[in-house]
Image (tube, rainbow, N blue to C red):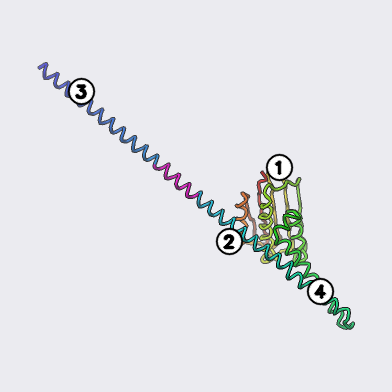
Amino acid sequence: MSILLQERAVSTAAERYLLVYMLAVLIIVTTLVIVFFIVFQKRKNKLLLDKIKQQQEFDEEISRTQTEIQEQTLKHIGWELHDNVGQLLAYASMQMNMISAKASSDIKESIDATSDVIKESLKEVRSLSKSLNNEVILNIGFEESINNELNRLKRMKFASAKLHIKGDKVPFNDKKHEIIIFRILQEFFSNSVKYSEAENLSVFLNYQPNMLVIEASDDGKGFDMETVEKGSGLINMKSRAELINATFNMYSKPNEGVKIIIDYPLS
């Protein structure tokens, strides 16, 4: 009887050890599976993040390249306007002056009026050529470039076009950013000329300790932000702002004009 009890005790102990062993193996296997799953997920997430980062860097490089190509194209157009078209208009103005000196009194007034139109056209061409050439913009400065552009637009179309400045001017750390912000404003001005039917333009530069807040607005017919088609102009402005880590927002309502706000970090 004693031997039977001993054998049963040994059997029970063996079963207990086997159960513990199986539980330990199960725990180890489960732990390994969990660890493997966590490592796999981390690696998968890292690969996804790397892919997203690479795509963002690729998109930024494409945008940067497109911007550089556009700047080179605008500079070339500016040179052509200044050197070729400008010279032709200057020559035409000189010829009109010579003709006016010899013309009879009955047609002299018409010739002089035509000469004045040519001179005004020459002035506009030279002003436009300056606004297209980034080297000229950098040379005369950011604020002066905006002023020149507003004055040109005022002569063309608008009753008023004013620049307002608040705070002490803080220089840009990267001069290229001046060009990019100026091009965003030019895009806004162009849209105002083409679509807004506005009479007045205004630009506010608010220099804060670590931020330059730029507001540009017109008093045109505006549009419904919910239904308007997002055209290339808006896309260009947003993508240019993203290149310089600035935030871009546009606000408009029917019959209430359009406003854009650019928050550009100065440091």
Q: Give the CA distance from mark 4 to mark 3.
A: 115 Å
Disc number for residue 93? 4
- Pointer 4 local density, CA inside 10 Å: few below 14, some 14–19, many at least 20: many
Q: CA distance from mark 1 to mark 2?
A: 33 Å
Query: Extreme left residue here?
Result: 1
Determine whether 12 is above or below 48 in the image.
above
Q: Which residue is mark 1?
A: 209
* Image position of 253 (left or right of 129): left
Give the residue drawn at x 66%, y 66%.
195
| Marks 3/1: CA–CA distance | 78 Å
**What secondary structure is marked by label 2?**
loop
Q: Earlier in the sequence, mark 4 or mark 3?
A: 3
Residue 181 placement: quadrant: bottom right
Mark 1 or mark 2, whichever is nearer to me: 1
Pointers 2 and 3 in contact (C-beta within 8 Å): no
CA–CA distance in space, label 4 to label 2? 43 Å
- Name which residue type carries label 3: Ala
Q: Find the magenta span and give its range.
A: 40-52
What is the distance, in whole Å, between disc 2 and disc 3 at their CAs? 77 Å
| 155 relative to 260 in the view: left or right | right
Q: Earlier in the sequence, mark 2 or mark 3?
A: 3
Give the number of the disc on residue 230.
2
The image's mark for residue 13 is: 3
Q: Nearer the viewer, mark 4 or mark 3?
A: 4
Element type where label 3 sits in the image:
helix
The reply to whether the C-beta atoms of the residues labelled 3 and 1 are less than 8 Å apart is no
10 Å crowding of disc 1: few (<14), some (14-19), many (20+): few
Q: Which residue appears at 84% of the width and 78% of the height?
A: 111
Residue 240 at x, y percent in the picture = 62, 55
